Image (cartoon, rainbow, N blue to C red):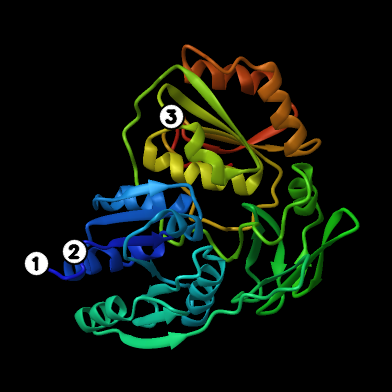
Amino acid sequence: MNSPTADFVMVVHGPEAFDAGDVERLIGLLAPQRVLVAGVMGRTAAEESGLPATCTDERPSAVFDTLNGRTYLVNRGKTPESGRIFGEIIAGRLESKRGLVHVECSNRTVYCWDRTDDALAGEIAERTGFVLVRETSARARPEGVREVRGCLPGEAVFVNGIVIGTATEETVVLTSEGGTLRAVSGLDPKPHGFEKLLRAGLPDLDTAWCKSGPVRRVPPGRGERTFRGGRVAVIDHCGHTLYREIGEGVCGVLAIGDDTTAVCGHICSHAGIPVFGVVDGDADAIVKPGYAPGSVVVEVTCGRDDDVGREVAATRGLTPPCWEAWVEETLRTLAGRVRIVVDRREGNDAMRRV
């Protein structure tokens, strides 16, 4: 296909555009030279789709700031309004101030944010049949205040990959003052979540990754297992860092925390890597569950998942010759302090929950 958009770069955010088939359709219509994927679950969905794409851990605004050519964002928000808000946020963060062409699949709209490439936006709208809309992003925000907009009441709210509470309004307002972080409005806070977040230091609200809602709505794919022994990667309440850790030679993942275990189980199911998860039962249902064969999840019956998980990381060797033997020995060391809630070891049901 000889397309005027063939020299352009498509930047896809999140898994929804892949899971809904938007990316495949847009590649067929626009024939971009390259497809870049921003976001952890976006990478998982991209790899499962089999479409040609390059994945990055960088946030979309950082990706656009490194590209010199003509580019456009593809997104599917959980609602049309949340999709529009996301585009506005990205446009407002661009250091180049060059504007943004934003293809929002949830309502079939091409947004022209600020001083953007009108010719490119018009070409995309013509080829896709999407409506063309011009918008201006809001750049000014009070210092030390962050609004998480487009929330649905009842859904989880994240800061830097950690759930800090449940939305009670469409906008959650956070502030950092006096060396700590607090919710001003719109949030039913999760104190343990704030504790986990602040353990790494007070986040910069101007640059923190904030979102609400599930990280992916579809079940994970199933991949082939590669290593039976090797290195155990440790992921402690930061599931969004997983791809940095599961490189060559990883035979399994020790995941600490309910939501972290869910995210690691989902991604590692696709990668064929078993997970040993340590949880304490306060999961926020942020992702469809799934675990590769060989996985075990234990719930702490005395104490907290933080403490037990770090004990395992500190006292159990993390370069076992055999993952199954490592799991068996780890379970023996935790006897009487945990109960198995997911068991995908050989000989058990596909995903036995006790």
Contact check, label 2 and label 1, Cβ < 8 Å: yes
Residue 255 picture quarter? top right
Say whether disc 1 or disc 3 marks the residue closer to the N-terminus.
Answer: 1
Please report the residue visible at 39 percent of the width from the left and 88 percent of the height from the top: 133
Q: Secondary structure at mark 3?
A: loop
The residues tagged by marks 2 and 1 sit, at their Cα atoms, a distance apart of 7 Å
Report the quarter where the N terminus lies: bottom left
Tell me the residue that label 1 is attached to. Answer: 2
User: Which is more toward the observer, 76 or 232?
Assistant: 76
Relative to 86, 303 lies left or right: right
Q: Nearer the viewer, mark 1 or mark 3?
A: 1
What residue do we see at 25% from left, 49% from top?
50
Q: Measured along the vertical axis of the image, is residue 105 above or below residue 334?
A: below
- Residue beneath disc 2: 6
Residue at 38 percent of width and 42 percent of height: 270
Residue 316 at least partly seen: yes
Instruction: From the image, tell me which residue sits under label 3.
Output: 247
Report the label total: 3
- Residue 350, horizontal then vertical, whole percent: 41, 40
- Label 2 environment density (alpha carbons within 10 Å; few <14, some 14–19, many ≥20): some
Q: CA distance from mark 1 to mark 3?
A: 38 Å
